[in-house]
Amino acid sequence: MSMTPEKDFGTPAISATQMVNLEIDGFQVIAPAGTSVMRAASSIGIDIPKLCATDSIEPFGSCRLCVVEIKGGRGMPASCTTPIAEGMVVTTQNKKLADVRRGVMELYISDHPLDCLTCAANGDCELQDMAGAVGLREVRYNPAGENHLNSVKDESNPYFTFDPSKCIVCSRCVRACEETQGTFALTIDGRGFDSKVSPSQNQPFMDSECVSCGACVQACPTATLMEKSVIDHGTPEHAVVTTCAYCGVGCSFRAEMKGSQVIRMVPNKDGKANHGHSCVKGRFAFGYATHKDRITKPMIRKSIKDHWQEVTWEEAINYAASELKRIQEKHGKDSIGGITSSRCTNEETYLVQKLIRAGFGNNNVDTCARVCHSPTGYGLKQTFGESSGTQNFDSVMKADVIMVIGANPTDGHPVFGSQMKKRLRQGAKLIVVDPREIDLVRTPHVAANYHLKLRPSSNVALINAIAHVVVTESLVDEEFVKSRCDVESFNKWRNFIADKRHAPEATESITGVPAADIRAAAKLYASAKNGAIYYGLGVTEHSQGSTMVIGIANLAMATGNLGREGVGVNPLRGQNNVQGSCDMGSFPHEYPGYRHVSDKATRQLFEQNWGVSLQPEPGLRIPNMFDAASDGSFLGLYVEGEDIAQSDPDIQHVHHALRSMECVIVQDLFLNETAKFAHVFLPGSSFLEKNGTFTNAERRISPVRKVMPALASYEDWEITQMLSNAMGYPMNYNHPSEIMAEIARLTPSFSGVSYEKIDQLGSIQWPCTDDTPEGTPTMHEHEFMRDNGKGLFMLTEFVASQEKVTQKFPLILTTGRILSQYNVGAQTRRTENNAWHAEDLLEIHPHDAEDRGLKDQDWVGIKSRAGETVLRAKISERVQPGVVYTTFHFPESGANVITTDNSDWATNCPEYKVTAVQVSKVSHPSEWQQDYQAFSERQLELLAKE
Amino acid sequence: MSTTIFVPCDSAALALGAEKVAKAILAEAEKRKLDIQIIRNGSRGLFWLEPLVEIATDKGRIAYGPVQASDVTSLFDANFLAGGSHPLFLGLTEELSYLKNQQRLTFARVGITDPTSLDDYLAHDGYRGLKNALATTGVDIVKQVTDSGLRGRGGAAFPTGIKWNTVLNTPAEQKYILCNADEGDSGTYSDRMVMEDDPFVLIEGMTIAGIAVGATQGYIYLRCEYPHSHKALNKAITKAYEAGYLGGNILGSGKKFDLEVRLGAGAYICGEETSLMESLEGKRGLVRFKPPLPAICGLFGKPTVVNNVISLASVPIILDKGGEYYKNFGMGRSRGTLPIQLAGNLKQPGLIELAFGVTLRELLYDYGGGSASGRPIKAVQVGGPLGAYLPESQFDTQLDYEAFAAIWAVLGHGGIVAFDDTVDMAEMARYSMEFCKIESCGKCTPCRIGSTRGMEVIEDIMKGHDLNKNIPLLRDLCNTLLNGSLCALGGMTPYPVLSALNHFPADFGITNQADAA
């Protein structure tokens, strides 16, 4: 809890096996070869003064404070840039060194404002610390000398300021932008005394290429780059390590606090997913937690036409329970259900599914993973035997060829995107499979070797073509297949995929990708020492989403790219706890740990533990719930932390379903879109207000820790517990750790997990069992998780989507997200992140725009067979002709008014990525938008106190 | 029979009107219907005589100078084509004492040949070193260079053979030979003269270096202020390729060496070898820390020989005549010869190549002829803008790396700039700090801030402000620069500053010795 700063060893750790012995100030030190003298000294507690060195970036050797003397050597080398050597004898403190250090510090301070007491970094300033360390007592230089004290402060970024008058030109920010983030937005402009940090071409930060990841702010040793929140509130007094609630990277953060107020979120250097890096969302966009839109009192109403009434918790819970019971009595046990969310903790999700299975007495539970990664769960379970990615993030640092399919890591998973870019800058090769030119295709010092710019909906044809090349050009890793895979299934697959209908030349007309490029890319991947595949929703959100996941799994097995570091099949999960919510049994057909509800042994285990009898048949999936609601057979819904009325496809159908229900209970932070159709509103708690765990895309279970009291009095798991008790199914947990203990007791892959161990290790990658007590970074190392231990090949016939372009709908709309906004935007839209992205835009190729007489910023109508909406146009060559693209962060955009009810054959994951549309210039919002705006405004009026 | 006339094309001669002289001679010869041939040779390096026109005669080349276009008619009238008497007549060039007593090894051809004529180069012992190199092993080439005692002529005086040996013994798929031709020191021009007046010797030296260490690519990083060097080098490189002295199969040996000239963009700091590499890689010219040494991790992260022009241009004669031959020149640990460049307030400025061991006084008075102004020489700066100022009392110092180090001075690149007694040494010290300020890359703190503060402190001293505080402050600052700087720019700026202060305290307003502390 204390504010003890994290130890800075000055230079990065070296992982060499050879050890070197040396002597520093008379002490014997042993450190890996290649370690700097500075780090070696730091490792035994000798902190050599430093300013330009910090252990997150490579040494630079510019400040000259860290000079030392080495016996037998000449002059005073910088300890940060001098590697240790056997038998070296180092002196870090003597009069000569002290004179030089004081001389350097006197120079620094001769061009630095003397306003320490009123400076935002007072007490948290390395320059101040070093002035003390070297014993600077006076600055003798003429104060009238040339200086930078009147430099103008840049306050353009909403979250931090840049004050060049305080800059010591150590280049830590520039280097962090390059090495850590990989954006290269910063540089030093001018030289000598005129050297100054310059965003892009000497522009304000907001006009520059800066992505506001915060790496520069983190690296800055002074108040030059400073969080505005610290300027406003002062330095924090304690810190709590917790986990970010945005994307599936699951960055570890120190929530730095003043009492119960978060002053800043600082990426945790020890975080195994992020290693001290962050993005604009996790680092800065936490203000939503205390936004004025937060609802903090429970509310109920009879009808969605009624005003909301604030009631006590007891009243709200009792009302909700009585309504659910009333509906069940009248319409049967199966007439109600619930939806949990990938944004909730593992413990909350577990509890919701438990409430539904044990309390509601049915299996009508689903999660938003339904609409994102359910095909991953299915496809990887079938082929590898486990519904999860195979690696940890760090594995990418050993990949030689990286294939990114239908994912946009620099926007969607920015911290991992930066790590991937780092590896690419080290020389790994890159294949991008995406209809759109994502940033990764060409970004500073990174260029894709191949960008297979396929047509949306042709994924399976493409992966088959790649596999065809592997099989027909003798690129199969026969040894791996023979020893690790189900050979019979492989042989069947080999015959299937070798057929010339899968050849790149044959599928070129489907994919639109030149056959030669596919052949070359296939060879590149298959011949790599380590080939790794990363994919996202561009793979899953298709009518053949599961087929594509299987296709990827087949390809990785056939080329032997599994079971070690540097390889693997890596789904990049969209939300913070997609992996966890799936693990926790929130699908209607599975108990925690992906065990089917029809499996008798498992069911009995849960029946015994939960003390109820459980249904052996799977319950309703989300789209089935909507259909049943419209039919009048499904009338009560408990939704925790998800906004189905914005995020689900064919939104008019969803709205109709919601209107048809008798009791919709929404548990959320805000009156979200779904809540506008609700009868009971239970105010939830943000990730800052509760304890629990999130599981990221690499199966890493990380702690979520309460840093402030729940604004509405209860953590979400407590609310679920109250509802369960009111429903008549008793729950009596005192802390989420007890829920985790139950999960561990009932789920083999979690059997070794406990809060104590998470605290001790920082995080744990499941499976965590007696065999793997500290977790499993790499899956399937010796055998696959299937019953017979063998990887299964499955056939992946390409079937064209029903969603086809026609004369009426000649363009394909595909959707995605952007760095600064998150998902439905409920959180990020309530932060300053809107400064980067204030509305969703329709990206359209110049040719298609030209055909329609469209200019940049024109209002365009987008019409599909499902509906119509209006957005502003952004003319861009990132999209190919025939394809348009938008994001879905703003409810008024109605991106999901247009998306259709097509879905994955195996899992019903919606085909968000493929909608045939027509686009035309319009002058006013669509009819849906006008209606919805009126509805939405009315709902906000109903919220106002009578 | 046609008479051959030599009119230099070296930029020193051009700056003094050589082009007009050449045109006037042609025009006059045509007028008089005389059969002449003009060869544009390099400069002999006797700048006070430039443009120095030479006539080829049976007895040898006869010199006239300094010749202006307006002198041409009278020269013809005086029958200078036959060596006729004229006020500008200087006699046989080789007999001029300034030249006669020199020991021209590296500059053996300079001023004699047509710089970009490969035939001329070959006719004057060119490419004999390369042929020997091709006939032996890399190890042996490096040994000969090591044996010769050649030390880096760019200023740091690091033994060339040891540097080459490191590159030779560092395995890599690609290695580079990098010639530092960013000759930016004030008062120096020997690199320029080699490149303009005998470019093949540099090309040959680099080719030998490449063969020695296994580097197949060479770059000459040339300052953009040397357009004539640029042209001469490119022309010579083209000819060397055409004749098989460069390229994929050098003289049929199967050995490969490619060479390219790259231009700098005007930054002095890019003459520092690591910034030079950064610049060549397309980055800001920022100094890199060492280690790693460029010989192990240099250009594009590959083992790289980075040598000065003169170092590389001295290699062909070493390979031609053997390391031992070269080593027999010089004294102590300073072996071979040094092309010394006399400049500043001297009657006879110019290029003098001599074995190490000559004294400053001999150079200033026997060669330089004393000050141009006729006033006493008060100080000389040796080794460029980062070299120390030496007072008259040190003029008997021999040119030798160790002898100079012993008096806290440097030989550097061999440039000597003389000042008479009108110079204000405090102003010179101030200027040294200003030079550092202007040219600092800005990476390390001592140089980035210290140069500006140094200038300001000296300005305060010059105004007589608080000497008791400012003189110790200046000394402390110099200590910080000297010990704390990342490279020699900040690290050596104290040499001129402190030498000026120590030898000429009166110029800083210090009247009693106690104040100088």
Image (cartoon, coloured by chain):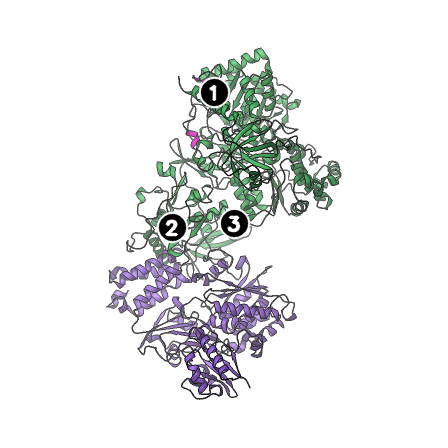
Chain colours: A green, B purple
Crowd tier of the residue under label 3, counting other residues whose Cα lies within 10 Å: few below 14, some 14–19, many 20 or above: few
* Residue A524 colored in magenta in the image: no
Q: Are marks 2 and 3 on the same chain?
A: yes
- Direction front: furthest residue: B31
**For the residues marked 2 and 1, what is the alpha-carbon distance in whole angstroms?**
52 Å
Q: Are marks 1 and 3 on the same chain?
A: yes
Three-letter code, disc 2 = Ile
Please state, as top left, top right, bottom left or bottom right, where the C terminus of chain A lies in the image. top left
Q: Is residue A849 above or below residue A727?
A: below
Q: Chain of mark 3?
A: A
**Chain part drawn in magenta:** A284-309
**For the residues marked 2 and 3, what is the alpha-carbon distance in whole angstroms?**
28 Å
Residue, disc 1: A681
Q: Place residue A806 in its image quadrant.
A: top right
Residue, disc 3: A14
Residue, disc 2: A168
| Identity of the residue drawn at 56% across and 23% down | A652
Three-letter code, disc 1 = Phe
* Disc 1 to disc 3: CB gap under 8 Å: no
Mostly what secondary structure, the magenta segment? loop
**For the residues marked 1 and 3, what is the alpha-carbon distance in whole angstroms?**
53 Å
